[in-house]
Amino acid sequence: MAVAKRADRHTPESLLAVAVDVFNVRGYDGTSMEDLAKAAGITKSSIYHHVAGKEELLRLAVTRALDGLFGVLVEPGATEGAAVDRFAYVVRRTCLELVENLPYVTLLLRVRGNTATEREALELRREFDHRVAELAAAAISDGDLRADLDPRLTSRLVFGLVNSVVEWYRPGGPESGTAVADALTSLVLGGLRAR
Amino acid sequence: MAVAKRADRHTPESLLAVAVDVFNVRGYDGTSMEDLAKAAGITKSSIYHHVAGKEELLRLAVTRALDGLFGVLVEPGATEGAAVDRFAYVVRRTCLELVENLPYVTLLLRVRGNTATEREALELRREFDHRVAELAAAAISDGDLRADLDPRLTSRLVFGLVNSVVEWYRPGGPESGTAVADALTSLVLGGLRAR
DNA sequence: GTCTATACCGTGATAGAC
DNA sequence: GTCTATCACGGTATAGAC
């Protein structure tokens, strides 16, 4: 992290990749342009040649994360079939999207709402959560998910579970993304107790 | 939040309560001493009469959260009986501890590791997670929890689920703390699918 | 595309009066 | 216990040379 990544030539894209990594270690507010400059191997001033400033890097990152998440909702598996199947599909695919797009989604989930960019991101996150909560409610109405658990509470718990993966998952670690997504979906739908 | 809370006389304790709330809205790094002063209804300088500085407020807060969490591990329900029961007990009690001590635990879970105080807190969090992971592993060995899910992965998912409660639970909201703890424990052990 | 130099402001923190 | 005044520092961002 203190090590400069030495790129002969930077682009907005390469700079974004560096910035998101640093943001995720130090936190967005805890990251200075000096931190970014060191990590990118260039000076603070040079960064402004590529992007308008720190907040634009944040905006680019969370936009990418949100595009990926909303993309899941329009896939056939999320729009066709029984609600319980669509719910399970979205849970699994959201989890996969999260691990495949890890740094960007991680940053999105840590946004606090101190700037306009952050507040817009939070608003879109709420909309995404709402869309999935509707799926869960439909599956409960169909009698395919337990009715003794409150629908709103259920979808919040499931979402919390999916989102919490960013706190520990590391690509190249012992688990593959699909293994995590499968285990998570299995835990949610089947529970943890031995049969 | 922009509204001063107007306390005639502050103590380190009353200041801590204010600070933790502001930290949880703005983020620790995103909070300035000026923000704290406004929220407390006094000036920046007056804050230093009560506490050494911003980082001490963070240290007091995370220490309180950690004391509560480790307290769960020495309760009889966590030390006596079958591993699966101790595991279920700890999951439920940790969840209760979290909602009853919400602002302090929330702050603890958002610490990034930029200062010595934060790194010590992260270290103790890891130790707590490890203790519970051992419980889960023992329950799997006993054949009381599913063996087809990896033990480490399982405890990570369960922990992520418990910790994620801070992201949406609000005291005085529709759900009581015990309702959340019961639903969460039920989801983990029983699963979500209708029987 | 990157650099050095610099403007300008908000930050955490202190001194000393009341 | 709180205030006003002030400090040194590091923050984001810009200007202009190479």
Image (cartoon, coloured by chain):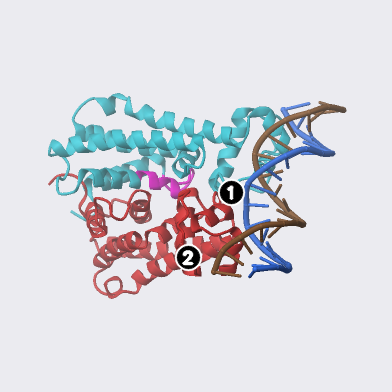
Chain colours: A cyan, B red, C blue, D brown
Amino acid of disc 1: Gly
Q: Quadrant of residue B78?
A: bottom left
Query: Whole-percent x and y of residue B174?
Result: 24, 50
Q: Quadrant of residue A88?
A: top left
Q: Residue at x 29, y 47 (%)?
A: A157
Would you say residue A171 sits in the magenta stretch?
Answer: yes
Q: Chain of mark 2?
A: B
Query: Whole-percent x and y of residue A80?
Result: 23, 25
Q: Kindly identify which residue carries mark 1.
A: A30
Q: State the residue in front, A101 or B63.
A: B63
Q: Residue at x 31, y 51 (%)?
A: B149
Query: Whole-percent x and y of residue B90?
Result: 30, 65
Q: Kindly identify which residue carries mark 2.
A: B8
Q: Is residue B12 left or right of residue C14?
A: left
Segment tinted magenta in the rendering? A162-175
Location of residue A142 with respect to B106 vertically, above or below: above
- The tag on residue B190 is none
Q: Residue at x 13, y 35 (%)?
A: A142
Amino acid of disc 2: Asp
